[in-house]
Image (cartoon, rainbow, N blue to C red):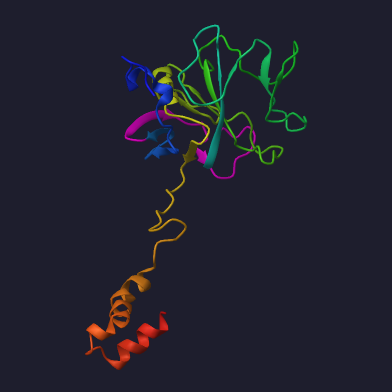
Amino acid sequence: MLKKGQTKACCPMRARSLSVIRVRTRPGFRTRGLLLAGPRAISVVLGRGGVRANKFEGDGGTPRGRFRLIRLWWRADRHPRAATLLPMRRISADLAWCEDPLDPRYNRPFGRPAGAAGDRLWRTDRLYDFVIELDHNTRPRVARRGSAVFLHVARPDRSPTAGCVALTAADLRRLLARLGPETRIAIETPPVRAATHAGRKSPSRRARAWRPILWRWENRRSFPWIGKKGRSAAQSLR
């Protein structure tokens, strides 16, 4: 419940999170796309290899599929806490992401000792000021199937990423207010076909065509002129 004098605009974290956000490639531009979040369409940058269903480490591709948003990592030394329903963690100076397929920590965050390899989340530029971790290649983690796939801030020149989805800092901050643990990101996947009833698939064309005959058979006392052929056809559908 909002306190006296408060409005929904001043309490963005109370807004209901989106169930799904969708990413589509722009026709003719494999490294550019649109992120559809409710009624909003946000311009995004994709991996240099385009969207790929069969992703491997180092191919520069953005993985096709439907993924959970695990948590938000952010630079607390540069920004206050974001208004979001996602779990949040601060990025520390020693935080890195393991990209070595032979390492048991592959595709996981770890503390980076001096000189250790890994994608550093503590950067001098602004690309990782806000980083949303996706559950790509996590259940299970398979070596060489890709690591460190994030939703993060785009470069000022909007150049392609190494496989992540990137957008402007302003767009990402606005989007965060509508994201939560139940939100999924669908990258180049068709929308799920809506069901007519909970737990049921949409009826086939044949089933829809026989509906009038079945209805007349069930109400045959009001339709005495229904023929023998129609009765037998209706009975076969019961």
Q: Nearer the viewer, residue 7 or 152?
A: 7
Q: Which quarter of the figure has residue 94? A: top right
First to last magenta residue range: 38-61
Decide if residue 61 is in sight here.
Answer: no
The overriding secondary structure of the stretch rendered in magenta is loop
In which quadrant will I find the N terminus?
A: top left
Residue 60 part of the magenta segment: yes
Residue 184 part of the magenta segment: no
Query: Is 136 left or right of 210, judged from the image as shown?
Result: right
Compared with 59, 116 (above or below) is above
Compared with 138, 72 (above or below) is above
Q: Position of residue 191 (x, y in %)?
A: 42, 48
Q: Position of residue 167 (x, y in %)?
A: 43, 24
Q: Nearer the viewer, residue 14 or 102?
A: 14
Q: Position of residue 87 (x, y in %)?
A: 56, 24
Q: Position of residue 62 (x, y in %)?
A: 53, 35
Q: Nearer the viewer, residue 225 or 230?
A: 225
**Residue plotted at (37% across, 29% down):** 42
**Residue plotted at (73% across, 33% down):** 101
Q: Report the residue that reaches farthest toward the top.
A: 77
Q: Nearer the viewer, residue 214 or 91?
A: 214
Count the labels in the image: 0
Q: Which quarter of the figure has residue 193? A: bottom left
Q: Which quarter of the figure has residue 25? A: top left
